[in-house]
Image (spheres, helix red, strand yellow):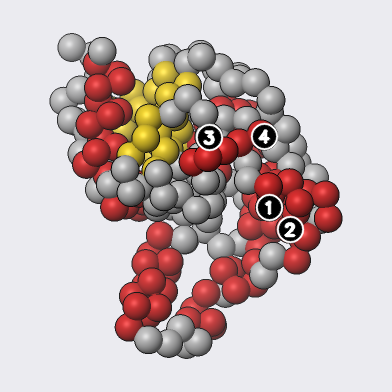
Amino acid sequence: MNKIPIYLMPGLAAGPEIFENLELDKEKYELHYLKWLLPLAHEESISNYAMRLCEEIKSENPVLIGVSFGGIMVQEISKFIDTKKVIIISSVKKKNELPKKFHFAKFTKAYKLFPTKVVSNFEDYAQYFLGKSLKKRAKVYKKYLSVRSKTYLNWSISKVINWDQDKYSENIVHIHGTKDHVFPLNNISNCIEIKNGTHIMILTKAKKISKIIDDVLTC
């Protein structure tokens, strides 16, 4: 039996490590991990960026899985290639699912003030994390937020805030946590809910997410 090719796109600033807890049968699925590219310029469109990522996809009719901003990106990629299924996790399907604070940031241009320097120079700021819980969180961020180019971060934040999609494909499966505080559930429609799932549930609820993915692809 031919394996189903799956291409996985991590969230903003994250690397493929965020998928390490997924439990997908390697006898059924062939996993490929997409990585963030450096934008050609701050003005590069999300469509052009998606087209460049398409060059990394060698399989025909693949499954695309994206987390958070990666979920937005796989939707953009799917506009240029045929896909078996697009699965987004902790993400949004259209601009109206973005929270009000994102629309406010777009209107006021406040997103340009985001302290990307802190993320891009994480080690320089890690010393300011005090307390056991924050030190533990700092280690998690250091491990999973591995894409820290200031150019990339500024570009990505701008593209999320200004994403303009108002219709989405019926080929999309949306998995979302009930306690996602980045993209609150009350703004989301037509999704598979994971109880108590947060925005980083790809790490904490990977077993449940894996089962949903398997069920979707084998039904």
Say whether marks 3 and 4 touch (CB < 8 Å): no
Disc on the earlier residue, 2 or 3: 2
Q: Quadrant of the N terminus?
A: top left
Report the residue at 29% width, 52% height from top: 204
Say whether marks 2 and 3 touch (CB < 8 Å): no
Report the residue at 33% width, 39% height from top: 194
- Amino acid, disc 3: Ile
Extreme residue toward the front, this view: 186
Question: On the image, numbered disc 4 is attached to which residue?
Answer: 95
Residue 24 coordinates in the image, percent (x, y): 22, 33
Residue 211 lies, with reference to residue 38, above or below; the image says: above
Residue 183 lies, with reference to residue 209, above or below; the image says: below
Q: Which mark is residue 101?
A: 1
Figure disc tally: 4
Disc on the earlier residue, 3 or 4: 4
Question: On the image, numbered disc 3 is attached to which residue?
Answer: 188
Question: On the image, numbered disc 2 is attached to which residue?
Answer: 111
Res 187 visible: yes
Disc on the earlier residue, 4 or 2: 4
Judged from the image, the secondary structure of the residue bearing numbered disc 2 is: helix
Say whether marks 4 and 2 touch (CB < 8 Å): no
Judged from the image, the secondary structure of the residue bearing numbered disc 3 is: loop
Report the residue at 34% width, 78% height from top: 133
